[in-house]
Image (spheres, rainbow, N blue to C red):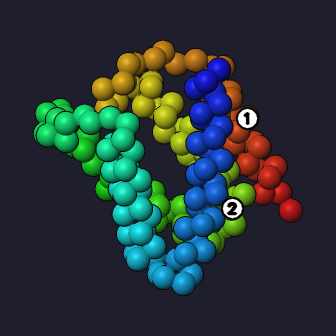
Amino acid sequence: MTGFIIALISGALMSVQGVFNTQVTKTAGMWVSNMWVQFSAFIVCLIVWFFAGRDSVGSLMEVQPKYMLLGGAIGAGITWTVIKSMDQLGPAKAALLIVIAQLIVAYVIELFGLFGMDKSPFEWRKAGGLLLALIGIAIFQWK
């Protein structure tokens, strides 16, 4: 149940953050805004790390495969795409499409066991859920 609640909070925070970042971009520009998002996240993580844990920063060099360290760079891409999509589509449509893209990619990662994740068998129930979500998008977009 805790994971469920955390996931709901994560989704809510992503939507609010996307709106905030889009508004900042209107004044500061895309890359200044994106830089601020990444920098402020770094500062928060540094403060929490200082008080809540002290895992060795050097352990990052032990991560294998090394491409797993690209999460921050991917984060910059996420920030950019969320800002652009919310600006062009509005928060609700953008969030809906972002979530369905997350579901599809996450299911493909599970199916094929990509990036070190455990491989899961294909389930028609999950494919049906994705189809239902796509139908939901069509209904949401319907004018």
Mark 1: amino acid: Leu
* Left-right relation of 80 to 90: left
The residue pinned by badge 2 equals 91
* 82 to the left or right of 92: left
Q: Amino acid at mark 2?
A: Pro
Distance from Cα at disc 1 to Cα at disc 2: 21 Å
**Quarter assignment of residue 16:** bottom right
Point out the residue furthest to the right here: 143
Where residue 80 appears, as percent x and y from the top left, is: 46, 65
**Relative to 33, does residue 138 appear above or below in the rendering?**
above
Residue 56 seen in this snapshot? yes
SS class, disc 2 = helix
One can see residue 65 in this view = no
* Viewport quadrant of the C terminus: bottom right
Residue, x 26% and y 40% (percent of image)? 68
Q: Position of residue 12 (x, y in %)?
A: 66, 47
* Snapshot quadrant of residue 66: top left
User: Which residue is drawn at the image coordinates 45% and 25% (left, top)?
Assistant: 110
Q: Secondary structure at mark 1?
A: helix
In the picture, the disc for residue 132 is: 1
Q: Estimate the x, y position of residue 85 in percent, counting from the top left.
A: 58, 65
| Residues under numbered marks 1 and 2 in contact, where contact means CB atoms less than 8 Å apart | no
Residue found 36% across the figure and 63% down from its top: 39
